[in-house]
Image (cartoon, grey):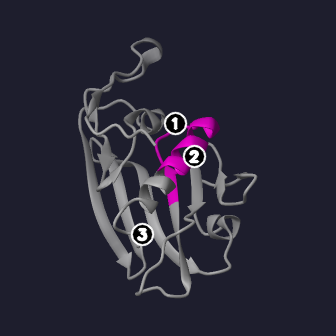
Amino acid sequence: MNVLLGALALTGCSGGGEEERAYDIPGALCGIPLDAGLVEPFLPGGKTLTTKESAPNGGTKRCDVLIDGDIVLRQTRTWWARGESASSVAAGYLGVQGAKVSADSRFVHSGTGGVGKTSSCTSDDHPRQNLYTVIHALAPDQEDPVAMEALIAAFTAAVEDSEDCN
């Protein structure tokens, strides 16, 4: 997997009244490397991009991407019971309504959200659970099912290569 490690400066469309993108899209968000081109379709114009990490419970890590202080994209890594499907996990998250299921059933995605089931992650802290990834795009008018399908697959692969996955 080719991962863009440097930051890319991208600008939004100047026509149609869309606000210009004055920030750089980093090649990693909260420690998970991602090609900036995969994230870009879900980021609106604005001046600054920041990230905020949280751990709302012992089995979940969350990374919020904020543009000018507003959450526009949320990445989640969460442990769920073995035997759960990506579809059943997706039912617990917003933004995945009308989701399409991949041929191997590891991924579901819509235009604004996706869920992926890691294939090789284990944890001593979660011995009877699988690690799932979740992406939720929250910015208005940033819906793109094709881009979300690519993003959730890349995010899941990056998590599998991270320290979250033994």
Task: Tell me if residue 153 comes above or below residue 45 in the rendering.
Answer: below
Q: Is residue 150 left or right of residue 44?
A: right
- Indicate whether 12 appears above or below 125: above
Q: Residue at x 34, y 37 (%)?
A: 4
Q: CA distance from mark 2 to mark 1?
A: 7 Å
- State yes or no: residue 147 in magenta: yes
In what element is the residue under mark 3?
loop
Query: Circle 2: is it few (<14), some (14-19), or many (20+) Cα within 10 Å?
Result: many
In the displayed structure, 82 sits above or below 17; it is below
- The answer to whether the residues at label 3 and label 1 have Cβ atoms under 8 Å apart is no
Helix, strand or loop for disc 2: loop
Residues in magenta? 134-154
| Residue 146, magenta (yes or no) | yes
Q: Quadrant of residue 83?
A: bottom right
Look at label 2 and name its amino acid.
Answer: Thr
Identify residue for label 3. 165
User: Which amino acid type is marked by label 1?
Assistant: Gln
Pinpoint residue 25: horizontal percent, then vertical percent: 31, 36
Which residue is label 2 attached to? 112
Sequence-wise, the earlier of marks 3 and 2 is: 2
Mark 3 vs mark 2, CA separation in Å: 25 Å
Q: Give coordinates of residue 41: x percent, y percent.
A: 48, 33
Residue 48 coordinates in the image, percent (x, y): 23, 37
Residue tagged 1: 142
Q: Of marks 3 and 1, which one's residue comes earlier in the chain? A: 1
Q: Amino acid at mark 3?
A: Cys
At x 38%, y 40%, the residue is: 3
Give the number of callouts. Answer: 3
Circles 2, 1 touching at the beta carbon (< 8 Å): yes
Is disc 1 surrounded by few (<14), some (14 to 19) or many (20+) residues within 10 Å?
Answer: some
Q: Is residue 20 left or right of residue 106?
A: left
